[in-house]
Amino acid sequence: MTPQDQRHYDVIILGAGAAGLMCALTAANRGKRALVLEKANKPGKKILMSGGGRCNFTNLFVEPENYISDNPHFCKSALSRYTQWDFISLIESHRIPYAERKHGQLFCRDSAKDILNMLLDLCTRAGVEIRCNTQVTAISRDMPEGAEEETPLSDAYRYKLQIENRQVACQSLVVATGALSVPTLGGSGFGYDIAKQFALETSPLRAGLVPLTFSDSMKTVCEQLSGISLEVQISIKNIIFTEDLLFTHRGISGPVVLQISNYWQPGTSIDIDLLPGIDATRLLVDAKSTSGSSLLRTAMGQVLPRALVLELQSIWWPDMAERPLAEFSDAALRDIGARVNRWQLKPSGTEGYRTAEVTLGGVCTHELNAKTMETNKHKGLYFIGEVVDVSGHLGGFNFQWAWSSGVSAGSVA
């Protein structure tokens, strides 16, 4: 093999995360010479940290409705080409023990290392070359003599990448760089820079699956309740999620908050039902008739954490805090009950990309072929994973998008 051959690859994948590794091994299994370039010191950092170190690698109930995109139909092709059952079969063939949690979420029983080691082993067997601590400083298209600029889909295009003090070239370039979320694990905007270089449109970016924060009096309430968790229902218009909420020093978090954060916009309110499935008004009115000598906080403390009840008392009925239920009018109890079932709060913001699990928005789907993830303008240029304007709900859906989009590109790149 000549030095020139050693610098040329059939496909180069930028990013050794879930999508990049899946794409690489898929392409290599087709006999393609594949190189993965990763700027971090090791591959799969986000895989290792996900799911509390156990990696929520997919979900039993993957549907297009679990994804957010300007084009809600775009994800269908990739998700049907490589399904959650395909990935489950893959890990079962490697005898990786896993467990189902709520809402069909699948986690490793032991460690997320099982998933990463499986992918790396498959890459090794397929002959994939992975280089970490490698920064790409420039990307260009090389048109051999005779190729014309007016034919952007010509096979004559090749991509050249400058890495350190040398160049590598490829027939196909796959951008699997991830996005802006969790910069400590390698998140960056490099993929969007590449899109811009090749005149591809991107949709507005914002942090998703992220805790919500407050700057008004609610911030103090959250500080007082930090560490307390309970199951609630949160809604914005007709978008509803029921799951655990966690109070933090900065605001509210927990699975249900992360889910609704994808739909929250600055300046808008969220509705929290503290007793989903329970008519709080009926509960309080009945308590008045059966335990009229009791305090309202006592009745509420039967169904809600005591610390939360005390905070609600200071907000909603401070002047009646020491009065028995019998002295509350039914109208007053109806008002408090209504607030329990629909506590309206207006967050001031989110914790941002530092703690966000995904980045909403990205490379616009109309720039890509839904079946192959190849750009429509440039033959051999692909975008997969989180850098694309496809974001999943919490629960393994983003990993499934990574596997599915990786296979789609790797099957043709």
Image (cartoon, rainbow, N blue to C red):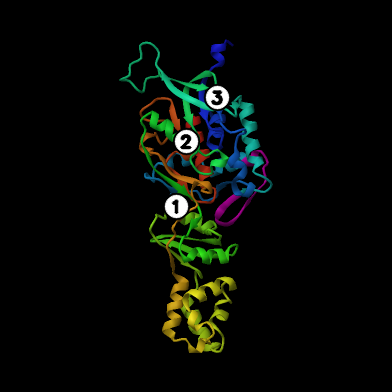
- Nearest the viewer among 247 and 118 is 247
Local crowd size for mark 1, using a 10 Å CA cut-off: few (<14), some (14–19), many (≥20): many
Residue 109, relative to residue 118: is it above or below? below
Give x and y (percent) for residue 228: 59, 65
Tell me if label 1 and label 3 are in contact, CB under 8 Å: no
**Residue beneath disc 3:** 34
Tell me if label 3 and label 2 are in contact, CB under 8 Å: no
Q: Is residue 179 magenta?
A: no
**Residue beneath disc 2:** 384
Local crowd size for mark 3, using a 10 Å CA cut-off: few (<14), some (14–19), many (≥20): many
Q: Which residues are magenta?
A: 91-106
Give x and y (percent) for residue 398: 51, 45
Taking the spot 66% from the left edge, 41% from the top edge, the residue there is 113
**In front: label 2 or label 1:** 1
Q: Secondary structure at mark 2?
A: loop
- Measured in 3D between alpha carbons, the distance from the residue under mark 1 to the one under mark 3, in whole angstroms, is 35 Å
Q: How many marks?
A: 3
Q: Residue furthest left?
A: 150
**Quarter residue 85 falls in:** top right
